[in-house]
Amino acid sequence: MTAPLRSLAQALLGAALVLTGTGHLTFARREFRAQVPPWVPLDVDTVVLLSGVVEIVVGVALLVSWRQPRRAVVGTGAAILFVAVLPGNIAQLTEHRDAFGLDTDRERAVRLLFQPVLIAWALWSTEAISQWRRGARPGR
């Protein structure tokens, strides 16, 4: 029963990342600009576009990677992506930037609590942690 649930969770996460990445490039581009910390040494729009492409690539990889150990590698990559965007979410809170309907510090803080959930989702759905424990590597 767990395997189908993990597969569904992986597919949902992949689809969500494709949608979110598409939003970076199109309909939500302005909103995503609010999450780029001012200390990032690149043009804000460039960061939004590049991160959108990365999200689409990771999302598609989640949608097509079903065999181990590749599946775990993709899940680990998704978890790393969620860690990498954390500074943007923190910047949105600390700089009091409104975006995505989050217009209070409390709402922005609550959103931060979901970042670990996304990281755990990526690792659980792809069985990444159990693969690490087995010592599996791509190509084995």
Image (cartoon, rainbow, N blue to C red):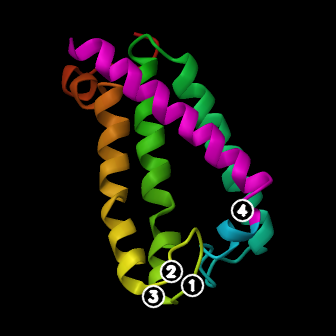
| Earlier sequence position, callout 1 versus callout 2 | 2
Q: Residues within 10 Å of mark 1 (few under 14, many from 20)?
A: some
Question: Where does label 3 land, which residue?
Answer: 94
Query: The C terminus is located in which quarter?
Result: top left
Q: Earlier in the sequence, mark 3 or mark 4?
A: 4
Give the Cα distance between marks 2 and 4.
14 Å
79, 63: nearer the viewer:
63
Relative to residue 33, is residue 133 depicted above or below?
above
Q: Nearer the N terminus, badge 1 or badge 4? A: 4
Q: Which element carries disc 2, helix, strand or loop?
A: helix
Residue 28 on the magenta segment: yes
C-alpha distance separating marks 3 and 4: 19 Å
> Tags 3 and 2 in contact by the CB under 8 Å rule?
yes
Cα distance between the residues tagged 3 and 2: 5 Å
Residue 138 image offset from top left, x and y in percent = 44, 18
Front position among marks 1 and 2: 1
Q: Amino acid at mark 1?
A: Arg
Q: Residues within 10 Å of mark 4 (few under 14, many from 20)?
A: many
**Residue 18 horizontal side relative to residue 4, left or right:** right
Q: The disc labelled 2 sits on which kind of residue? A: Ala
Residue 129: x, y in percent? 25, 31
Can you identify the residue that label 4 sits on? 48
Magenta stretch: give its range.
Answer: 1-29
Q: Secondary structure at mark 1?
A: loop
Question: Where does the image place residue 124, in percent across and percent down from the top left?
Answer: 28, 32
- Residue ID for mark 1: 97
**Label 4 amino acid?**
Val
Residue 127, placed above or below residue 101: above
Q: Quadrant of residue 3?
A: top left
The label on residue 91 is 2
Tell whether label 2 touches label 1 (CB within 8 Å): yes
Rendering coords of residue 92 (x, y %): 52, 79
